[in-house]
Amino acid sequence: MQCLDTMQDRFLADILRNGHNRSILDRWSALALPDGWLVAGCLFQTVWNLQSGRAPEAAIKDYDLFYFDASDTTEAGERSVQARVEQVLGDLGVTVEASNQARVHLWYESYFGRPYQALCSARDGIDRFLIPATCVGIRPNELYAPNGLELVYDGLLTMNPLTPHRDLFERKAASYCARWSWLQIGEGQNRPPTHILSLE
């Protein structure tokens, strides 16, 4: 087992090999996202690409930003934030999508057919990704990895007990395995302690 600091350093170095991740973090202050995080596929898929001998940016379809603004849970408010994101990052030539985690419960059930409780922070949204290995977020000087980082590097896909929707999990896991054939699907595990790591 690698020590946490070593794995943290490795993860940071790996995700920054993706030039789009690096550019987004370099421009972070201009995004002005309340409780903002760069999350999900652009992070763990960069790691999986590197482990597969591919270019770090290969086949990453979008770059997701989570933020939390309970003062404006309207769709129009989220669109306004998205417009600012596109103004700041549009020259990168990739799709960057901003999602207000304070309003996910308003649309999730109609879209995915499952209820979704209201969240209290952007980190709550990261906690609820379907697969624990993919629950990661980063912003300048801070990494959030509620299930640690070993699952990312081990490529172990299990169902998240906080979002126990087996049909959604199986579709997501199958999609990942089709693109990274060395990934493994396993049984769910008890959720380990949360890791909020300073990168300073």
Image (cartoon, grey):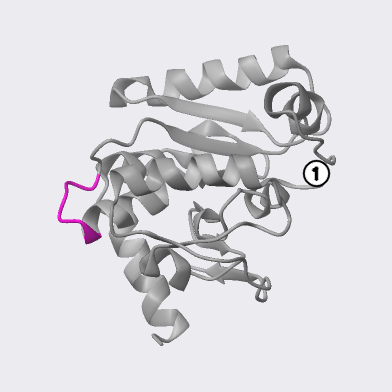
Where is residue 150, by image quadrant?
A: bottom left
Q: Position of residue 43 (x, y in %)?
A: 40, 50
Vertical position of residue 11 compared to residue 109: above or below:
below
Residue 72 makes an appearance in the image:
no
Residue 192 makes an appearance in the image:
yes
Report the side of 140 relative to 75 (left or right): left
**Residue 46 shown in magenta:** no
Quarter of the picture containing the N terminus is bottom left
For the point 56% across and 20% down, which residue is it?
Answer: 82
Report the side of 54 relative to 41 (left or right): left
In the rendered image, the residue lying farthest to the top is: 76
Looking at the picture, tell me which residue is in the foreground, 83 or 14.
14
Looking at the picture, tell me which residue is in the foreground, 183 or 143.
183
Task: Provide the residue span drawn in magenta.
Answer: 51-56
Q: Position of residue 193 (x, y in %)?
A: 67, 76
Residue flagged by tag 1: what amino acid is it? Leu
For the point 71% across and 12% down, which residue is it?
Answer: 76
Check disc 1: other Cα within 10 Å, few if <14, some if 14-19, many if 20+. some
- Magenta span: predominant SS is loop
Vertical position of residue 95 compared to residue 172: above or below:
above
Q: Position of residue 158 (x, y in %)?
A: 55, 60
Report the side of 185 relative to 128 (left or right): left
Element type at marker 1?
A: loop
For the point 27% across and 35% down, which residue is it?
Answer: 59
Looking at the picture, tell me which residue is in the foreground, 67 or 175.
175
Judging by the rendered image, the residue that carries numbered circle 1 is 119
